[in-house]
Image: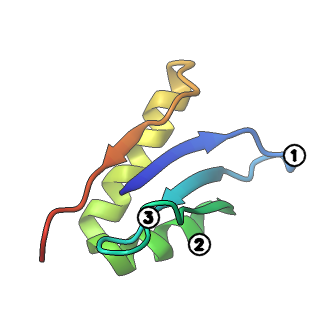
Amino acid sequence: MIRIRRVKSAIPLVRMYELEIRRQGGDPNKIEQLVVRRGLAVRRLEGMLGIGDAWSFIHEADRQWGTGNRAWAVEFEETGR
């Protein structure tokens, strides 16, 4: 499970994102939670999803932020690989 949303940054002009990640096949109660800058968010997502999907998640989080939505922009449940 992967969830992402953009969050308010204390530093002007820096985009921050909150990620929640639960690894497939892992402990269902173990969820990694991160608040990171855009570059690190993309790198973390790229490792799990690939380049195109990682950027589409970031763009959707930005789009939702622009509309005033502060809830999770993307909630993705991984299927078997």
Q: Residues within 10 Å of mark 2 (few under 14, many from 20)?
A: some
Q: Which mark is residue 40?
A: 2
User: Which corner quadrant holds the C terminus?
Assistant: bottom left
Kind of residue at badge 2? Leu
Q: Residues within 10 Å of mark 3 (few under 14, many from 20)?
A: some
Cβ–Cβ under 8 Å for marks 1 and 3: no
Q: For this rendering, which residue is in front, 76 or 69?
A: 76
Q: Residues within 10 Å of mark 1 (few under 14, many from 20)?
A: few
Q: Marks 3 and 2, Cα distance to the nearest angstrom?
A: 17 Å
Cβ–Cβ under 8 Å for marks 2 and 1: no
**Sequence-earlier tag: 2 or 1:** 1
The colour mode here is: rainbow
Kind of residue at badge 3? Arg
**Sequence-earlier tag: 3 or 2:** 3
Q: Which residue in the rendered view is the most extreme toward the top?
A: 68
In the rendered structure, the answer to whether residue 73 lies left or right of residue 38 reads: left
Residue 53's place in the image compared with 59, above or below, is below
Q: Position of residue 58 (x, y in %)?
A: 44, 52
**Sequence-earlier tag: 1 or 3:** 1
- Which residue in the structure is indicated by mark 3? 22
Q: Residue at x 36, y 57 (%)?
A: 1
- Which residue in the structure is indicated by mark 1? 10
Q: Position of residue 8 (x, y in %)?
A: 74, 38
Q: Secondary structure at mark 2?
A: helix
Residue 61's place in the image compared with 19, above or below, is above
